Amino acid sequence: MFLFQKKNARSVPIKSEGRENMTLIKDVFTEEWVSKLGHRLGFEQEFCQKSYSTDWDDLSFKERVRRLSVTMHDFLPDSFDQAAEWLEKNAPDFNGLAGIVFPDYIEVYGQEDWDRSLTALEILTSFSTSEFAIRPFLIRDQERCFSYIEKWTGSGNEHVRRLASEGTRPRLPWGQAIPSLIQDPSPSLPILKRLLKDPSLYVRKSVANHLNDISKTHPEVVLSIVKAYQGQYPHTDWILRHACRTLLKRGHPEALKLFGFNQTDGVKVESFLVPRSVEIGESLTFGLTLTIAESQKIRLDFAVDYVKKKGTRNRKVFKLSEGEAKAGKKQFNRKLSFADLTTRKHYPGTHTLTILINGIEAASADFEVM
């Protein structure tokens, strides 16, 4: 899952789900990059000394961001307006993931000058992203902040339009949650509706992710938007489908029906082969054969009930297949890794593998993780 991704040469993707070693992201702040920033400030040696100090190696990525932005403050003009102007001027030369230091400076030192701060965040987002820095402003005065954000939806810059959606996500990965928007997402809806036909896939992905966030606590809100806008525009249909991915995984009946997954009687599990055991660090390969009476649209998922550290179980759903299925037999084979990841640790015990057809459990089998 990408937390943010610029689509041009400035881009630096952040991935999760264990696909990259998250502890290495902090190394984006190379000695060359820090020295370059210090040189641009006019105090290379002093800046590097203060930035690194004695605990630099122990700092996480976000801690390094904050260390650098706070250290910059010692060398930037005392006037916040002049400091913001310096950031805007130099940001193009410090773009990508590392450039998030610049919006972070605005977050830390701009709380008393909203007009200048929000203007700066609008400019700086094009070179890295301001989606994290804007969140303290939202928490402090949501209504005032939205008066700026609503204008961004009409920007000719896709990065600014994306900020309007991404910056207001109630549950932004790596970012502060916005409790008021988790409880009541209605203030964000006009912003999202204005972006439903956005020509930029970069923006549309953000809108879909924002709506998916909302669906986790207010499914009825997202489903009402699907009913109102489905079938009107291809870009919008893609957003709506992607926005309902969590509801579809959870087997929400109304969501499944809205996207055409409303038949299961003619689909039967003919065979379901699951090994009796798998060792931690190895992979489990299972096989499935379906008999389909007539051609129809099918969403096929499998769920794994993982044993947790204290013996409880936690279900995670994975998509196996989706789309029009012709009448006849259809076979599937899937390999499921039990290698430990930074985001998932495996524990021995009885696990359960369940097949879901259009959200309905169709077959299950237990196996031991050794």
Image: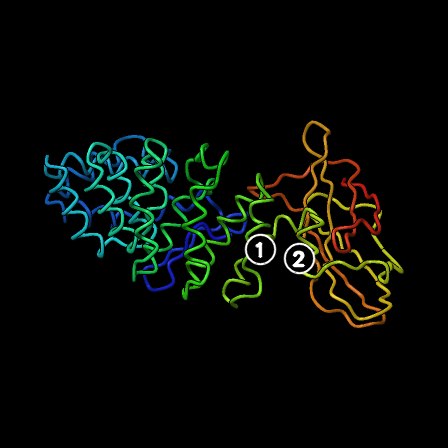
Residue lying furthest front: 228
Q: Position of residue 252 (x, y in %)?
A: 69, 47
User: Circle 1 — which element?
Assistant: helix
How many residues crowd around disc 1 within 10 Å: few (fewer than 14), some, or many (20 or more)?
many
Pick the front one: 28 or 229:
229
In the visual, does 335 lie left or right of 331?
left
- Quadrant of res 330: bottom right
Amino acid bearing label 2: Leu
In the visual, does 267 lie left or right of 240?
right
- Colouring mode (rainbow / by chain / secondary structure / one colour): rainbow
Amino acid bearing label 1: Val
The residue at which mark 1 appears reads as: 226
The residue at which mark 2 appears reads as: 258
88 is higher (above) or lower (below) than 61: below
How many residues crowd around disc 2 within 10 Å: few (fewer than 14), some, or many (20 or more)?
some
Label 2 with label 1: CB-CB less than 8 Å:
yes
Pick the front one: 1 or 244:
244
Give the residue drawn at x 42%, y 55%: 13
Q: Position of residue 105 (x, y in %)?
A: 24, 39
Q: How many marks?
A: 2
356 is higher (above) or lower (below) than 104: below
Residue lying furthest top: 310
Q: Position of residue 293 (x, y in %)?
A: 87, 68
Pick the front one: 175 or 312:
175
In the visual, does 145 lie left or right of 207?
left
Decide which of tag 2 and tag 1 comes sooner along the chain: 1
Give the residue drawn at x 14%, y 43%: 44
User: Circle 2 — which element?
Assistant: helix
Q: Position of residue 306 (x, y in %)?
A: 71, 39
